[in-house]
Amino acid sequence: MFIKILIGIAVIIIVLVIIVAARPSEYGVTRSVVIAAPPEAVFPHVNELKKWAVWNPWEKIDPAMKLTYDGPASGVGAS
């Protein structure tokens, strides 16, 4: 009886190992949202990093968060 239980556990472990090994090694998560506004109205809010505080959910969760800005105020090179 004990041997049958050990064999059953071993079979379950082998099946789980095979299932895990067959899964892809990488995965991705994609999220999207539809904004009911023209791109010209939205672009200034995402182009200038200092304006992100208005809509950034992390800013609301941690108001004591420190943000530092470098480079130009907006566009390429802003960080």
Image (spheres, helix red, strand yellow):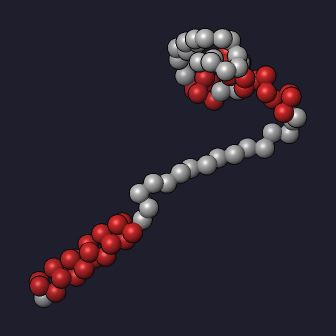
Using the rendered image of the protein, determine whether residue 8 is visible from the camera's viewpoint: yes
Quarter-of-image position of residue 3:
bottom left
Residue 7: where, in percent of width, then height? Answer: 18, 82
Residue 9: where, in percent of width, then height? Answer: 22, 77
Quarter-of-image position of residue 76:
top right
State the residue in front, 10 or 18.
18
Quarter-of-image position of residue 69:
top right
Query: Relative to 77, does residue 31 appear above or below in the rendering?
Result: below
Quarter of the rendering occupied by the N terminus? bottom left
State the residue in front, 57 or 79.
79
Query: Relative to 55, does residue 51 appear above or below in the rendering?
Result: above
Q: Is residue 10 left or right of residue 51?
A: left
Query: Relative to 15, does residue 4 appear above or below in the rendering?
Result: below
Question: Residue visible at 39% across and 69% down?
Answer: 22
Using the rendered image of the protein, determine whether residue 64 is visible from the camera's viewpoint: no
Q: Is residue 41 left or right of residue 5?
A: right
Q: Looking at this rendering, what residue extends furthest in the left direction?
A: 2
Question: Residue visible at 31% across and 76% down?
Answer: 15
Give the number of callouts.
0
Residue 4: where, in percent of width, then height? Answer: 16, 86
Question: Residue visible at 49% across and 54% down?
Answer: 27
Quarter of the rendering occupied by the C terminus? top right
Q: Looking at this rendering, what residue extends furthest in the front direction?
A: 76
State the residue in front, 14 or 44.
44
Question: Residue visible at 79% across and 27% down?
Answer: 43
